[in-house]
Amino acid sequence: MSQVEKTRGGASRRDVLRIGAGAGGLVIAFSLAGRSEAATGAVGPAKINTYVRIAPDGVVTIIGKNPEVGQGIKTSLPMIIAEELDVDWKDVRVEQADNDPVAYGRQIAGGSTATPLHWDELRRVGAAGRAMIVAAAAKDWGVPAGECTTASGVVSHARTRKRATYGALAAKAAAMPAPADLALLPLKDAKDYKIIGKFTGQVDNLKIVTGQPLFGVDTRLPGMLYATFLKAPVFGAKVSSADLTAALAVKGVRKAFVVEGGTELTGLLPGVAVVADSWWAAMKGREKLNVQWAAHPTSAQSTANFDARAAELSKTKPQQTLRSDGDTTAALKAAATTVEAAYVYPFISHANLEPQNCTAHFKDGKMEMWAPTQLPEPGRQLVAKTLGIAPENIVVHLIRGGGGFGRRLTNDPMVEAAWIAREAGAPVKLLWTREDDMRHDFYRPGGYHYLRAGLDAGGAVTAWENHFVTFGDKEQISVASMAPTEFPARFVPNYRYDTSLMPLGFPTGPLRAPRSNALSWVAHSFIDELAHAAGADQVAFRLKLLGDADKVGEDPAVYEAGRMRGVLAEVAKRAGWGRKLPARSGLGCAFHYSHRGYFAEVIEVAVADDGAVKVIKAWAVGDVGRQIVNPAGADNQVQGSVLDGISSALTQEITFDNGAVVQGNFNDYPLMRISESAPVDVHFLITDNLPTGLGEPALPPAPPALCNAIFAATGVRIRKLPIDTALLKKA
């Protein structure tokens, strides 16, 4: 370690390690500044507030602190610790942490935040552990610690030729004082990395491919019962009456009861629970229920009504102005060319392959839960508040989720399972059906955009207006959630962004790359229209729009245009932009900044005479900073994001009728099949910026790149999603 990097952030003396001996090994726990200490003195190996355990045989166990829902964080965060600890990855075992906000702070899977929030923090964990072990060896050998080196879990001293394994030193290291200042600990130079930056398989891969119990649906407890929970088709409607007699007569059904519930859509809603010896019996009992639901105001809402009302609002004065730069009215009058268009996108479901579920056991006033949640501590607090249990009497075990995409940030399955388990008096696993999952989601909200833009004689964009009609209450929705800084804000001198809101009785929530996943399609499809109107090359037009400045705006909303120009130029090069293609084939491009990541993408399509769209290939180039922690996981995230975005544009739509969701399963809400997917070429530009996340930023450019490619192939502009292939039939 000839070169070192000092950590950022000015760690204080409270940023220390708690070191303890247990079972002959070393246990390392990390306490962040400003968080209360959970324990003092020796920390046993069974403690869950530890990151690292080192056994006498040299096996290193590292705790994955954040929930794992397929984003690979259970692998990449321990890789960061292992690198600075200076052990071999083959000697590392990874265990999932339970929910413990005292030991770990905020544990979340969402927002592509894990890498940027923990990059420095977890390197210090590994570096401090290494320093303690080196100090123990130096004391034992009577040599300066600075003369000792480490590699592959071994400490060596060249002059005396002494060496010892971490396992042999672990107990002695436990008695050493913690480093006085973590900010002064040397960190490895990137050129010396042996784990970070190497293609590494996910730690759960073997269990996944061999079908071993791992996910929430696999949870089994002694004496466990199974539950299903029937809620009204109309969100929040109460039970008017329920005849449970036939359900209780089904063999294996133990209990059936009405849950009064409340009105908060993120909490415990009214419904009827059926508890049985088996999932089959629970479902058979549910089929026998005779439930009448009370009238509810949301029953008057429907997609058809939304469409009609949006059209009306588009012709009226907007309710709010979110951003106004310059004078768009004057600029549009002076424009050499004006372009108008309306874009519409639907509500969509998260459609996790693993339906919502949770297992709970209430005993002696305490609740123990096994939950595939993305946000465990708010889930624990929700259960505590709803059931009147002290939070400290609730234990939440984090279970791997079969997909999250933002759905598992909402913990309604947790509070349902907890309530049912308390009533049942036994451990209960609540499992939703696919129809439950799709019809009681927290949807990505739909939207209607009415745009006008002006071009000068040279083809430059001089004005941009957008009247965005969407859903919610203007007293509840913040300006930030409507994204007044989304591109091309700040890049057009005369820019106006207005909104009008319609009331909504259906719950909405974040879905992978929230906000950007929809607004990017609108903005970059319309930009394609403007390029066409200007008679300009699509890539050249976008580079011109990005301008010459490297950075635009002020912190914390700086847009690094130089980084975006870099990824756009690179993806065009890799895709062979401008090459000749067969008839009814086309290339489309788009870029977007989302969740700290800069991505540009090109998609090639071929459109059959009957209108069927085939994606031939996609290219994605991203800039997420100076270091990719796990290239295998990074490639997986980008490829999945691009295909996810393409799938949403092609087929996904949630509609409402009489206050209820129409779609219920994959027959009427199809996802992209493996046979329909296409290769995605992934490339990263390495720049001198802090590492950031990858779960979300690669998705937003995919839908507009796809639709722009379809226009290049057919001349048909897609202004409504999902894509109606009937419009693409050859005349």
Image: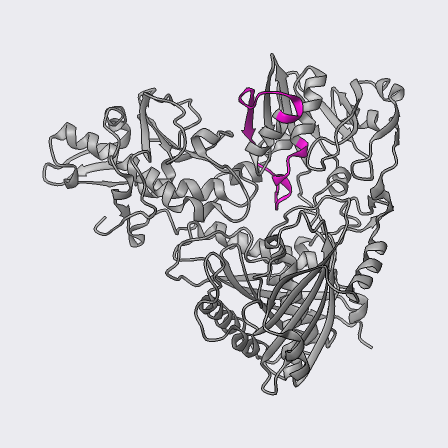
- Rendered position, 2 above or below 293: below
Visible residue check, residue 729: yes
Q: Is residue 599 left or right of residue 22?
A: right
- Is 643 situated left or right of 310 in this image? left
* Image coords of residue 585 (percent x, y): 67, 74
Q: In the picture shown, does residue 531 fall above or below 439?
A: below
Farthest-out residue, bottom? 457
Q: Quadrant of the C terminus?
A: bottom right
Left or right, residue 670 beside residue 546: right
Residue 394 magenta-drawn?
yes
Is 563 placed above or below 9 here? below
Picture coordinates of residue 74 (x, y %)?
48, 40
Q: Residue furthest top?
A: 364
Residue at the image point whose x is 62% and y is 27% from the top: 219
Residue at 16% over, 32% down = 138
Across and down, in percent, residue 10 comes to: 31, 44
The boundaries of the magenta stretch are: 385-413
Between 670 and 320, the one nearer to me in the picture = 320
Quarter of the rendering containing residue 378: top right
Q: Is residue 431 left or right of residue 591?
A: right
Q: Nearer the viewer, residue 218 or 401?
A: 401
Is residue 584 visible to the viewer in this orientation of the structure? no
Magenta run includes residue 675: no
Identify which residue, 568 or 101, lies in the foreground: 101
